[in-house]
Amino acid sequence: MKPNLSHLYEATPVWLALFFTLTTCLTVGLLFTAIRQTSVRGASQFLMVSFSWLVVLGLLAHNQFFQQLDAKPPRFVVVLGPPLLVIISLLITSKGRLWINQLPLSRLTFLHIVRLPVELTLYGLYLYQQVPQLMTFEGGNYDILAGLTAPVIFYYAFKRKQLSPRWLLVWNVAMLGSVLNIVGHALLATPFPFQQLAFDQPNVAILKFPYVWLPGFVVPAVLFSHTVAILRLVKVFFNHRAVRRYGTENTEV
């Protein structure tokens, strides 16, 4: 079955593109403040690399680079590959693990508020035939709950300190599952050779400027924040068990 590509080259309203651009800037800003708490130099480097990456993606998308669907290998690899390689390198190298262990979980938790404007953007894109309904909160995508609950979790876990690391871990696992669910649906609804969903109104928005920043930066930032939090909280959980069983000490997040 062939996807309906009649909206592939249609532009979206300026206000919607601007709204998502501001959402991307918010994501950069929140991740910048998290990194800045551990290293001013590292934060400056992050800002420079992020800006350069967004400009590269933006220019390629503006010139319809990703809309050439018959290209081999698929050009969308350029969007997903570099961010995933950076995250993996940080997780598997000793220097990277040392660095991520210094990041404040409070800031990484608060970062997930960006998922609220992301979901509003997706709904706007659905109204303009750029994404299928299944990628919105009307179509079973409940990732908006992450954006709504993030400030509540942040407040009770880090301000009031009434939410235990165990429940913070549960929230992170659940919300990671939520974002992976929508990522999977989004990829299967995009007009790639492996498309399985939404042939009548496929996901063409992420092939365009500025929405290419969603898979190219915003989603990797969300995945990174959850992954770091889960790894750190799992360590805390096992440290707590060690305290009860063996009387060991180091239990800080």
Image (spheres, helix red, strand yellow):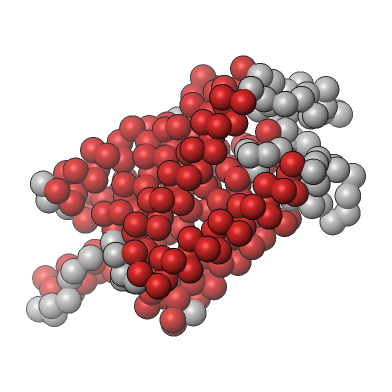
Q: Is residue 231 visible?
A: no
Task: Report x, y in % for residue 126.
Answer: 62, 22
Q: Position of residue 200 (x, y in %)?
A: 76, 21
> Which of the 4 image quadrants contains residue 251?
bottom left
Residue at image coords 13%, 73%? 243
Q: Is residue 147 visible?
A: yes
Using the image, determine if residue 162 lies above or below residue 94: above
Query: Which residue is nearer to you in this view: 89 or 61?
Result: 61
Query: Is 36 or 195 nearer to us in this picture?
Result: 36
170 vs 118: above or below: below
Q: Residue at x 55, y 64 (%)?
A: 49
Q: Is residue 142 left or right of residue 241?
A: right
x and y, in percent, of residue 19 in the image: 51, 31
Q: As drawn, is 17 to the left or to the right of 56?
A: left
Residue 83 percent coordinates (x, y): 59, 60
Residue at the image point whose x is 40% and y is 58% from the top: 32
Q: On the picture, is 72 further left or further right than 20?
A: right
Front-most of residues 22 and 172? 22
Q: Is residue 144 above or below residue 100?
A: above
Image quadrant in which you'd find residue 116 = top left
